[in-house]
Amino acid sequence: MIALAASSCSLKKIAVRQATGFFAESRKVFEQETDLEIAETSIASNLKLLEAMQVHDEHNDNLNLLIAEIYSAYTLSFAEDKMEQAEADKKDAEVERQRRRAKMLYLRARDFAGKVLLPLLDTDDLSKMTEQELQQRLAKLGKSDIAPVFWYAFAWGSAINVDREDTQGLSDLPKIEIMMAQVKAWDEAYYFAGAWLFEGVYFGARNEMMGGDPARAKAAFEKNLKLTEGKLLITQYFYARTYCIFAQDKACFDKNIAAVLDAPADLHPGQKLANALAKKKAERLKRRKADFFIE
């Protein structure tokens, strides 16, 4: 009976690992979907299927990172978008509900990435580490560890970014900056130059009294655009949404919004979903221009 139970467990893990590879490849199909409603429903249902698989193979690094990546992308694409729509509709209660939901989903993504990263850093709680300790332990890792570092930092930082009243979270931002700096040191173009995009939002979405740095944000966005050849439109959207608004630069705002809205639908054939979403968000932001600029 023990042998049969062990055999059954092993077979489940084999099946899960084969399925993980299938889902990783199938992700390309979702990334090329242009109907946002189909994409949202499909990605949400597949996330729960992946979590069900993870129960049978808890230490599957590839699966944990895949779940972290998809939760992060889903939250950015749909949960945050609902929050922004509620802001446009001036529905304060719905804004707060969607804000809490986005934060929860980002932290869920972070925790899946943490199943891979935290053992590498020999800790069970990264927030308890000092910045110096984090730098020292990251220095012991290699480029092959870039995925868990990036997705942990991206999800954690995004959770903090949607809830700027979380003082504990704000105090952890320097650690996220350290992690993203390490990602850039390994490969600055990793995941569509995501570390540069994060830096642009990080320093562009707050005023200087709150740690913002307009010049650094602008440089980060421009670096991302150079590395991605401007083919990932979400960069121009965030450029307009953060730096251009906080700098009160109308010309910058108009230029980036136009770049998104005028781009062909197949600008990046492999990222049609991301670009379709960027167009939707840019159109809404354009309609709200008067809300953000002082005449």
Image (tube, rainbow, N blue to C red):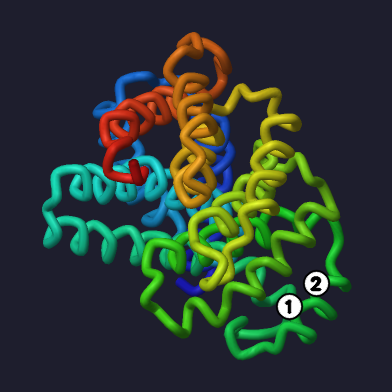
**What's under tag 2, amino acid-wise?**
Leu
Identify the residue under disc 2.
138
Q: Foreground: 134 or 91?
A: 91
Q: Foreground: 157 or 281?
A: 281
Q: Residue at x 46, y 58 (%)?
A: 54
How many marks on residues? 2
Q: CA distance from mark 1 to mark 2?
A: 7 Å
Q: Do callouts 1 and 2 mark residues in contact (Cβ within 8 Å)?
A: yes
- The location of residue 267, given as percent across then percent down, is 56, 13
From this viewpoint, is residue 16 visible?
no
From this viewpoint, is residue 156 visible?
yes
Q: Is residue 101 left or right of residue 54?
A: left
Q: Quadrant of residue 113?
A: bottom right
Q: Is residue 41 above or below residue 2?
A: above
| Label 2, residues with CA under 10 Å away: few <14, some 14-19, many ≥20 | some
Q: Residue at x 73, y 77 (%)?
A: 121
Q: Is residue 226 left or right of residue 287?
A: right
- The location of residue 202, given as percent across then percent down, is 57, 58
Q: Residue at x 45, y 45 (%)?
A: 245
Disc 1 on helix, strand or loop?
Answer: loop
Q: Residue at x 55, y 82 (%)?
A: 171
Disc 2 on helix, strand or loop?
Answer: helix
- In the rendered image, the quadrant that contains the C terminus is top left
Q: Quadrant of residue 41?
A: top left
**What's under tag 1, amino acid-wise?**
Leu
Q: Foreground: 181 or 152?
A: 181
Q: Foreground: 246 or 235?
A: 246
Question: Of the numbered discs in the image, which one, if any, rests on residue 164?
Answer: none
Identify the residue under disc 1.
121
- In the rendered image, the quadrant that contains the N terminus is bottom left
Q: Is residue 92 above or below residue 121?
A: above
- The location of residue 36, given as percent across then percent down, is 30, 27
